[in-house]
Structures are given as structure tokens and as C-alpha cells.
Image (cartoon, helix red, strand yellow):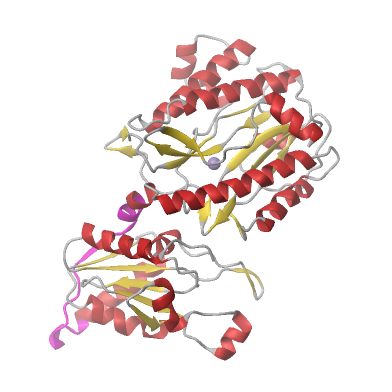
């Protein structure tokens, strides 16, 4: 499994402890397998916060960092018979392979946790983890009951999520290198899809190109469900059914990205199934592309996060006025959010271990300034509902989005998903001649 070097995880654990008051104890869980049906389970994917501090891939594991900074991993123990059925476990070897201070069998969790929490000033864990909430409360209550024996239950609980979210927001060089690798695998998969699209194909048959190239290039997992949306389906933002026939004259919107070492990539391209944009398709596409460039120009260190979205909104609104889909003054239509009938999502999101990654977008109510090491998507779009009777029939049912992954650097925005066409002529030539 692709992971960063152990020193990265060790220094992250040290950094968390350095932000907490003395005597605090940190607890995290990897999560458990989920049933799909009967006795079949979904593949396991560790919780992102847990993975950020451990790089450890096994289900059911727990991490406790004691008040002394010592890291304790609790995992399923080596068991020849169980491993024959369920697969390999690291067991005690996790100390060397992953750089933990101590590794315990999972069955010892309660006992060791009680001794680590006894006398701690605070317990810090992700409040969003309901099971862990129960665990921590039960440990506290056990320690309270042992007060006469000298035990001291921690009186403060604190949410770990805001601390880890801020840390995760800024990526280091190893993370960015891994994200670029994931992005480039996804670029190749999108190229292959564009080269192989044919009218009369089913959407999922085109989806097969994506999955084939992701896996063939070294990525075992998707970062999220593939969206392969032809024609009017492109107007459904999270369309994942992918079971319609692609027709001659349709645009095909693909929003798909692979995951590598638990890091996500996230790309959208929209292209004509028959290799030629119709006139209305090309006109709307050009507006989205112009909005992409307007947003891109705002992705610089020190610029407010929302500047990118505001620039894209202005370009889209102006474009829709020019083409006659919106009527009125630019300023008024932006203020009244009239564009939302055609552009109802944001122009991007943080990207990292989660496709919609963690990190606040606002600080004290203000859009936060961009910093070097932030990774985000840039993804303007236009979606004209097939039921929109306020616009000419030729526009209805057209959905377009263009999305790239970008890292903010001191030298300006760097496109991790470089090398994938987005100009009309480039796309037409890739679809037509391959
Ligand atoms: Mn996205």
C-alpha cells in the first residue's frame, strides 16, 4: 500500500500533542468493515483522520497518544487461522513497519485506555465518531467509580476534528507528489474515455475505460463514485446511475478520479459523443471555460478563497446574458443570484485524503486567504434544466462542467491534473482521432 514515510506520521502526532494542553490524551479509530449484503462486505478504507496520523491500513484499529506523547496502536493480533480466511495482519510488526512506539492486541484496548486516561487533563477525540463517544464516556465512568482506589477521570473532553482539519488543509511535499501521481493516473483514464466514446454505448461501458485505466496504472480504489452522464443526465450533479445509452449528439460529462494511498483526485471533462460540439453546446462550453480561466486567475497566495467563485459567477452570468439565457443587468443578476438556476454549486472545494476535504472555508465569518500548500478543485459549470421554459429549446438539457485539481504555490496555481485537454478544438480532435 502506498504511504508516506513514517517520520511524517510521527511528526504529525507530535504536532497534535504540541497544540494541546499538557496532560491531554488523543484517541482515534480506523473504523470497521461495512456489510453490503448477507455476509459480503465492502472493501475497507480507513477513516481519513486516523490514516493521517498513522498510515495504518487495517480495519478496527485504534490509536491512543498518551499524555507522555507515546503512541499506542491497538490492532487485530496475528492469528494464522484467521489470517488464512480474512487476510494478512501486521500485529506486533506494526511497530517497525509504521513507527509506532507500542502495539497492543485490540482486546487490550479497554485496559490500556483506562490506565492512559487515569489522571489525564483532557481526552481529545473526533466528536463525529459516535462509537468513540460511547467508549470515552464509558472509560470516564469506570475511572469515576474507581475514585476511592485513587483513579482520576478526565473532566475535559475536546473535539480533535478542528485541530486535524487545519493540519490536513496544508499539504507537504510528499502529499503533493502523491496527489499529482493520483491526478496523472486520472488524466490518463479521462483521455482513454474520450478516445473510446461511441454513440450507442451504455454509460457504464464508457465507465469501464476509467476503471480499467485507474487500476492498470496502479490505483486500486476510486476516490468517489464515477459520474458518467450523457445528455440531460449531466444536469443531475451527482448522477451515478450510469445506465443510459449514449446518443449521437449528446455531450458526455465524466466526473471521476482515482485514489492513491488514500489521497483523492477529482476531474471533470465534458465532450461530444460524436466528436463535434453543436453550436449551442459549444457556446455554453466556452462560457464555462472562460469562467475556469477567470477563477484560475484568483488562485494566488493571499487572495480570499471566495474570489475564485466570485470571478467564475461573474463570467458565467455575463455569458448567460450574452447568449440570451438570462435577461437583465449583470450586477443585479449577480446580486439576486439569478445565475443559480444554471450554476447551483460552488467553484471548488478542498481536496486531500477526502475528495471534499476538511478545513474551514471561513475564519471569523470571512473567506480565508489562500496559502501555499492548499490543494483544491476548480470546477465551474452550467446546467440548463430540460424543464426550463424560460430559455430557448436549443439550450435545454445541456450540462457542462470542467474541473481540475490545483495546488496553491508561492509561484501561482499549479495544475496537478495537467495534460488533459479542455479547449474545444483539442477535445474534438482527441475524441475524433484518438
Ligand atoms: Mn469536485
Quadrant of res 96: bottom left
Residue at left offset 83%, top offset 35%: 247
| Relative to 262, 94 lies left or right | left
Depth check: 325 or 295 in front?
295
Q: Quadrant of the C terminus?
A: top right
Residue at left offset 15%, top offset 88%: 149
User: 249 above or below 190?
Assistant: above
Quadrant of res 227: top right
User: 177 above or below 246?
Assistant: below
User: 417 above or below 358?
Assistant: above
Depth check: 36 or 93 in front?
93
Is residue 227 visible in the rendered structure shown here? no
Residue at left offset 80%, top offset 39%: 246
The answer to whether residue 291 is magenta is no
Looking at the picture, how far across and down is residue 81, in whole percent? 58, 90
Depth check: 222 or 430 in front?
430
Residue at left offset 61%, top offset 37%: 419
Quadrant of res 298: top left
Looking at the picture, how far across and down is residue 138, in whole percent? 31, 76
The answer to whether residue 156 is magenta is yes
Looking at the picture, how far across and down is residue 238, in whole percent? 61, 43
| Relative to 217, 251 lies left or right | right
The stretch of residues the image draws in magenta is 145-165
Q: In the current view of this chain or complex, which residue is farthest to the top?
A: 329
Amino acid at each position: 500500500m502506498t504511504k508516506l514515510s513514517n517520520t511524517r506520521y510521527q511528526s504529525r502526532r507530535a504536532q497534535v500533542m504540541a497544540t494541546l494542553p499538557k496532560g491531554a490524551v488523543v484517541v482515534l479509530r480506523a473504523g470497521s468493515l461495512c456489510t453490503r449484503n448477507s455476509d459480503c462486505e465492502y472493501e475497507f478504507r480507513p477513516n481519513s483522520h486516523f490514516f493521517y496520523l498513522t498510515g495504518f491500513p487495517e480495519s478496527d484499529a485504534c490509536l491512543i497518544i498518551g499524555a507522555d506523547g507515546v503512541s499506542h496502536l491497538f490492532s487485530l493480533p496475528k492469528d494464522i487461522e484467521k489470517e488464512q480466511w480474512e487476510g494478512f495482519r501486521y500485529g506486533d510488526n506494526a511497530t517497525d513497519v509504521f513507527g509506532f512506539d507500542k502495539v497492543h492486541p485490540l482486546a487490550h484496548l479497554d485496559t490500556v485506555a483506562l490506565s492512559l486516561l487515569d489522571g489525564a487533563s483532557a481526552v481529545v477525540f473526533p466528536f463525529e465518531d459516535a462509537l468513540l463517544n460511547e467508549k470515552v464516556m464509558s472509560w470516564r465512568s469506570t475511572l469515576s467509580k474507581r475514585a476511592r482506589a485513587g483513579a482520576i477521570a478526565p473532566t475535559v473532553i475536546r473535539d480533535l476534528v478542528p485541530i486535524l482539519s487545519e493540519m490536513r488543509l496544508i499539504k507537504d511535499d510528499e502529499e503533493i507528489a502523491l496527489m499529482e501521481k493520483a491526478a496523472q493516473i486520472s488524466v490518463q483514464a479521462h483521455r482513454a474515455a474520450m478516445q473510446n466514446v461511441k454513440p450507442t454505448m451504455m454509460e457504464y461501458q464508457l465507465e469501464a475505460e476509467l476503471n480499467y485505466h485507474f487500476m492498470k496504472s496502479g490505483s486500486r480504489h476510486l476516490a468517489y463514485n464515477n459520474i458518467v452522464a450523457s445528455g440531460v443526465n449531466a444536469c443531475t450533479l451527482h448522477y451515478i446511475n450510469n445506465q443510459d445509452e449514449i446518443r449521437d449528439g449528446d455531450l458526455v460529462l465524466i466526473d471521476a478520479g482515482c485514489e492513491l494511498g488514500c489521497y483523492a483526485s477529482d476531474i471533470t471533462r465534458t465532450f461530444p459523443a460524436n466528436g463535434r460540439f453543436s453550436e449551442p453546446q459549444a457556446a455554453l462550453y466556452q462560457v464555462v471555460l472562460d469562467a475556469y480561466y477567470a477563477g484560475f486567475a484568483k488562485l494566488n497566495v493571499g487572495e480570499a478563497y471566495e474570489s475564485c467563485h466570485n470571478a467564475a459567477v461573474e463570467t458565467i452570468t455575463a455569458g448567460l446574458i450574452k447568449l440570451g439565457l438570462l435577461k437583465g443587468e449583470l450586477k443585479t443578476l449577480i446580486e439576486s443570484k439569478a445565475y443559480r438556476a444554471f450554476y447551483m454549486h460552488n467553484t471548488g472545494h478542498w481536496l486531500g485524503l477526502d475528495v471534499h476535504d476538511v478545513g474551514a472555508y471561513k475564519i471569523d465569518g470571512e473567506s480565508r486567504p489562500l496559502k501555499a500548500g492548499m490543494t483544491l478543485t476548480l470546477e465551474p459549470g452550467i446546467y440548463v434544466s430540460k424543464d426550463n421554459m424560460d430559455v430557448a429549446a436549443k439550450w435545454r438539457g445541456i450540462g457542462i462542467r470542467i474541473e481540475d485539481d490545483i495546488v496553491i504555490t508561492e509561484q501561482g496555481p499549479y495544475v496537478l491534473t495537467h495534460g488533459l485537454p479542455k479547449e474545444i478544438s483539442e477535445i474534438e480532435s482527441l475524441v475524433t482521432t484518438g
